[in-house]
Amino acid sequence: TTLLLIDCQKDFHPGGSLAVPNADQDAERITQFIHQNATSIHRIVATMDSHHPLHIAHPSFWSDGQGNLPAPFTVISMEDVVEGRWIPREDVKPSARESLLIEDDILGGGIPSELYSTDETGNRQLNMKQWCIEYTRRLEAKGKFSLMIWPEHCLVGTEGQTVVRTICDAMMEWSRKTGGSVEWLNKGQNLLTENYSALCAEVPVTKGTSFNYELLESVSIYTIFVCVKMAVQFCWLRQYPLHVCCMYVAHEYILYIILKLKTSEKLIMCGQALSHCVQYTVRDIAEHWPNEEMGKLVVLKDCASTIPGFEDASDKFLSDMVSVGVNVETTETLTL
């Protein structure tokens, strides 16, 4: 049995910057569930929303013609960007360990010629407005939602990014009791796309969009050997630079985690928020899960709550999951 805890972080709980009502009560039930079923839970995987201030879904990324930032929960459409009602910052840069924010072969699908310009030194520069037009176009084409501006949340290194104390303590106690170690998956650090799902960005822009290099530190020696071999092969075939190969390795590691999830006799999922990151993580897992084994998937609906205003989305998600054979349970009805 694997327990997948999705974004059980302080910023999604009362007192946090993007607080979800009833999240504290969810955390209490998750904590009790871990304590009561510690010996029956063989693996715990915890995802962590991990953002920078200048993220495409944060206010500081945008301004209007007068320099005003969008208020949280503002929806920015492709038309808004085209018409200049909201203007992205042109000085957004990747971190020092990334030389690319976008990899053309990953983005694919007819890249606009206006996406890049060339500076006086001959270096190719990303046109941020054109990217935001393309990003919002692709989002809207998928039909799920438009770009929503959220309050800054789960900023890397801040208190709000950390797991709520009760759940964290329960996981540490589980580790001491069973000899297992929690597996951590970070998501959301790429500035130019969103990661509601822990498995895939809404618009994938790099091979490592959903990953943090720290993930590699927890891989076994054998897996490191396999991943290095794959990276060398990838580099040789594509003639890509080393940093791109590293992102490829990170991507293969998440596939390794997903394959391990598929070996679970039961995969139990919960966290925050039901309407967003829980929903899209579970949907991605269910989409890639064998139809004949859907009964292994469990959503604990009393351990996940909805962002106000998105109740219909949560209801439809749970209904859709039941219709494909996923078990929707509570901590009281589920037995291990």
Image (cartoon, grey):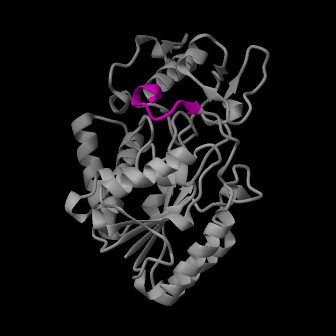
Q: Which of 48 and 146 is in front in this view?
A: 146
Q: Which quadrant would residue 42 be assigned to in this image?
A: bottom left
Q: Position of residue 187 (x, y in %)?
A: 51, 50
Q: Nearer the viewer, residue 232 or 152?
A: 152
Q: Position of residue 104 (x, y in %)?
A: 37, 27
For the point 71% across and 32% down, which residue is it?
A: 60
Q: In this view, does 323 lie above or below 195?
A: below
For the point 41% across and 37% down, which residue is it?
A: 204
Q: Nearer the viewer, residue 46 or 214?
A: 46
Left or right, residue 246 beside residue 25:
left
Q: In this view, does 204 lie above or below 186?
A: above
Q: Is 141 in the magenta?
A: yes
Q: How many labels does the image show?
A: 0
Q: In which quarter of the image is the N terminus?
A: bottom left
Q: In this view, does 200 lie above or below 323?
A: above
Left or right, residue 113 beside residue 182:
left
Q: In this view, does 107 lie above or below 31?
A: above
- Magenta stretch bounds: 139-147
Q: Where is residue 146 in the image (x, y as percent from the top left)?
A: 53, 30
For the point 61% across and 46% down, which residue is it?
A: 51
Q: Quadrant of the C terminus?
A: bottom left
Is residue 129 visible in the rendered image? The answer is: yes
Q: Is 86 in the magenta?
A: no
Is residue 249 visible in the rendered image? The answer is: no
Q: Position of residue 188 (x, y in %)?
A: 54, 46
Q: Nearer the viewer, residue 62 or 166?
A: 166
For the point 51% across and 19% down, which residue is it?
A: 133
